[in-house]
Amino acid sequence: MQPANDNRHSHGFMPRGLSRVQAAFYFGISPSLFDDLVREGRAPSPRTINTRTIWDVRDLDAAFDSLPYRNTVSDANPWDDAA
């Protein structure tokens, strides 16, 4: 049995087009944070099929790949070196 939040169809594969909620889940974030990323241009805009709004998994992958890595080196206070 598949979990309720599984993005795969009953055929056992993940669809290429995802709903807003599925796209946010794919990114690992909440739908509201996903909306912010789309608005800021850090996540892709959706595509449309008739009246349906969907996000292409390939577009999501490219956007996710372009997100910055957490920079642990610059976590230090820049004022520590001043003086």
Image (tube, rainbow, N blue to C red):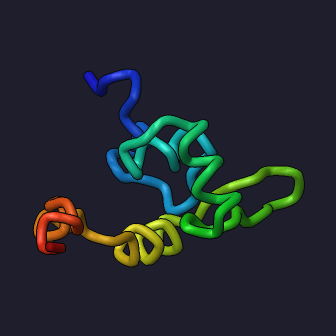
Q: Residue at x 52, y 49 (%)?
A: 23
Residue 41: name its quadrant: bottom right
Answer with left or right where residue 12 lies relative to residue 18.
left
Compared with 12, 39 (above or below) is below
Residue 68 picture location, percent across and down: 33, 71
Question: Which residue ends up furthest to the right in the rendered image?
Answer: 51
Answer with left or right where residue 12 lies relative to residue 72.
right
Q: Quadrant of the N terminus?
A: top left
Compared with 75, 78 (above or below) is below
Answer with left or right where residue 8 lies relative to residue 83.
right
Compared with 61, 52 (above or below) is above
Question: Which residue ends up furthest to the front in the rendered image?
Answer: 83
The residue lying toward the viewer, choosing from 37 and 53, is 37
Answer with left or right where residue 54 lies relative to residue 82.
right
Q: Quadrant of the C terminus?
A: bottom left
Q: How many marks?
A: 0
Compared with 40, 23 (above or below) is above
Residue 12 picture location, percent across and down: 33, 46
Residue 21: name its quadrant: top right
Residue 4 picture location, percent across and down: 39, 22
The residue lying toward the viewer, choosing from 14 and 19, is 19
Residue 11: name its quadrant: top left
Residue 42 picture location, percent across and down: 55, 67
The residue lying toward the viewer, choosing from 11 and 3, is 3
Q: Residue at x 54, y 42 (%)?
A: 33
Q: Residue at x 40, y 49 (%)?
A: 26
Q: Residue at x 69, y 66 (%)?
A: 45
